[in-house]
């Protein structure tokens, strides 16, 4: 499933970029988008179908065009995990926030189009709790049998990420987005006993570099009516 998602994204992005470079008479920037664009990451909603470790999450995005080709963006979400494995139970819950900037890199022959192919940067921060419990100690280690619980609250992690993606207007003010993200951790969670399996909004807790995909459905709210 993850490989199929990766191939789909790569194909979508490649087609968008190829289309842009094929238009040798491109003259026009994207039409200016008034109002805020709100979206939901549908790939987060599919987590229970993709994983069998009790993982559920949600993520919302918000962006606004501030210049001819520039957008400020914010992404916020939450993640929960309740995984029962042989020998232990692992629980995690937390929230995260990313703030950043995107720049459109495509131009069009036609006036009025608002599709974008963009590159961007994000700064991300997560705060979460995790709990390793129902630990079964194998015979030969101390006395064996059931162990206790290792719990840590208020863990923090910080990272930066580079993003390349596209947002295509399906119909007036409705968009479909896809993005590839490369994340580099700059502050690791501080737990000397249990390394987090996941960091909300980042990915695997034992990785200093993470690649991920995201897919979003978006709608532009324009009270002024200038987008119509």
Image (cartoon, grey):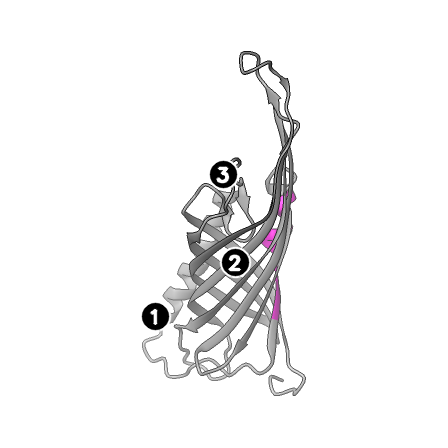
Q: Is residue 148 above or below residue 180?
A: above
Mark 3: secondary structure: loop
Q: Are marks 2 and 3 in contact (CB under 8 Å)?
A: no
Residue in the image at 43% along x and 59% along y: 160
**Tag on residue 124?**
none
Which quadrant of the structure image shows residue 226? bottom right
Inter-mark Cα distance, 2 to 1: 39 Å
Which label's residue is closer to the chain start, 3 or 1?
1
Highlighted magenta segment, given as a residue range: 38-48
Q: Is residue 89 above or below residue 168?
A: above
Residue in the image at 42% along x and 73% along y: 103
The quarter of the rendered structure image containing the N terminus is top right
Q: Are marks 2 and 1 in contact (CB under 8 Å)?
A: no
Q: Are marks 3 and 1 in contact (CB under 8 Å)?
A: no
Mark 1: secondary structure: helix
Which label's residue is closer to the chain start, 2 or 1?
1
Visible residue check, residue 228: yes
| Residue at the spot of label 3 | 192
Mark 2: secondary structure: strand
Residue 4, position as x, y percentages in the image? 50, 45
**Tag on residue 22?**
1
| Residue at the spot of label 2 | 125
Label 2 CA crowd tier, 10 Å (few <14, some 14–19, many 20+): many
Depth order, front residue of 107/201? 201
Residue in the image at 64% along x and 81% along y: 222
Inter-mark Cα distance, 2 to 3: 20 Å
Inter-mark Cα distance, 3 to 1: 53 Å
Residue 62, position as x, y percentages in the image? 58, 69
Depth order, front residue of 128/113? 128
Residue 171 as seen in the image, left or right of residue 187: right
Residue 44 in the magenta stretch? The answer is yes
């Amino acid at each position: 499933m993850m490989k199929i998602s990766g191939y789909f994204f790569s194909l979508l992005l490649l087609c968008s970029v190829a289309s842009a470079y094929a238009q040798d008479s491109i003259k026009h920037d994207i039409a200016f988008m008034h109002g805020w664009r709100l979206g939901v990451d549908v790939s987060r909603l599919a987590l229970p179908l993709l994983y069998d470790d009790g993982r559920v999450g949600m993520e919302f995005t918000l962006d606004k065009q501030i210049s001819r080709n520039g957008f400020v963006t914010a992404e916020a979400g939450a993640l929960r995990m309740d995984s029962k494995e042989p020998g232990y139970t692992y629980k995690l819950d937390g929230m995260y926030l990313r703030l950043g900037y995107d720049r459109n890199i495509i131009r069009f022959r036609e006036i009025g189009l608002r599709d974008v192919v963009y590159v961007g940067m994000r700064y991300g921060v997560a705060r979460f709790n995790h709990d390793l419990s129902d630990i079964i100690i194998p015979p030969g280690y101390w006395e064996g049998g059931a162990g206790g619980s290792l719990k840590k609250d208020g863990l923090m992690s910080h990272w930066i990420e580079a993003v390349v993606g596209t947002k295509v207007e399906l119909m007036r003010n409705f968009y479909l987005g896809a993005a590839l993200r490369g994340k580099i951790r700059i502050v690791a969670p501080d737990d000397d006993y249990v390394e987090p399996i996941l960091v909300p909004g980042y990915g695997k807790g034992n990785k200093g570099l993470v690649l991920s995909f995201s897919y979003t459905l978006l709608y532009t709210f324009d009270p002024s009516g200038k987008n119509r």
